[in-house]
Amino acid sequence: FTMRFLLKLTAAAVLASALTGQALANDAIKIGVTPGAHEEVMEEVAKVAATKGLDIEIVSFSDYVIPNQALDDGDLDANSFQHKPYLDNQIKDRGYDLSVVGYNILTPMGIYSNKIKSLDDLPEGAEVGIPNDPTNGGRALLVLQSQGLIKVDPAVGLVVSPLDIIENPKNISFVELDAAQLPRSLDDLDASAINTNYALEAGLNPIKDSIAIEGNDSPYANVIVTQTDRKDEPWVKTLVEAYHDDAVRKFIETKYEGSVLPVFKISE
């Protein structure tokens, strides 16, 4: 190679680097969601955010594990898919440095069945599907407790497992599955506890199709999350304001008719 060629190559590399840096500065904010309500609502949030000068790129994940890993790794700028107890458990187990910056929606967990019309009809020794992650599995057991089917050790708190059941008069067997797989389990099991986002994705209406549903006093409100050291960046405030906009609230209330509830409040 000639020296002139090498100088041109170096200049081109510097220019490319400068252009890349400029592109990164203008990139959209990447927000991780799960399919269904979280993704659909975020599409509305993106419209409002655009009017405030914030460009949002929505990245959809099919499970609950990867969005926090991707956020902690810096591959996402924020995520909006999980409730606070799940986030707390992930931080405890995996050491993530993530923080809640705002609340968004509550998606009440429902119990569904293709075999019975009421939990009163659940047979002796029934097989019931629950999510296999600790927080959503515990949430499912607490819903079943609220329906009088089981009793769990009150000392355990929200992170309940089948090992914490102290009363099980119908000798129910609990089948722990990935949350996304539970809608497909309905033909094989007597009933399953399904998170609303996966229920909606499977064409199930939590209000009409569930045989039991979580109460409005649930502690499982969903949250908007960023890396802790970025939580005070200006775009975060814009994102939360866009999510809490009246247009987004009206979209949620109209589209979901009570199966998804807005729980907007700024985190402290």
Image (spheres, rainbow, N blue to C red):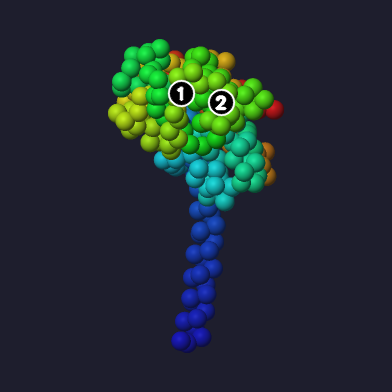
Amino acid type shown at disc 2: Ile
Q: Nearer the viewer, residue 32 or 95?
A: 95
Q: Residue at x 41, y 40 (%)?
A: 62
Label 1 sits on a secondary structure element that is loop
* Horizontal side of residue 222 vs 176, given as left or right: right
Residue 169 drawn at (x, y percent): 49, 18
Residue 99 drawn at (x, y percent): 64, 37
Quadrant, the C terminus: top right
Q: Residue at x 31, y 22 (%)?
A: 114
* Residue with the mark numbered 1: 171
Q: Residue at x 63, y 36 (%)?
A: 88
Q: Residues within 10 Å of mark 1 (few under 14, many from 20)?
A: some
Is residue 155 depicted above or below 258 in this figure? below
Q: Nearer the viewer, residue 248 or 167?
A: 167
Q: CA distance from mark 1 to mark 2?
A: 11 Å
- Marks 1 and 2, the one that precedes in the sequence: 2
Label 2 sits on a secondary structure element that is strand
Residue 113 seen in the current view: yes
Rendered image quadrant of residue 157: top right
Q: Nearer the viewer, residue 20 or 203?
A: 203
Rendered image quadrant of residue 21: bottom right
* Residue with the mark numbered 2: 165
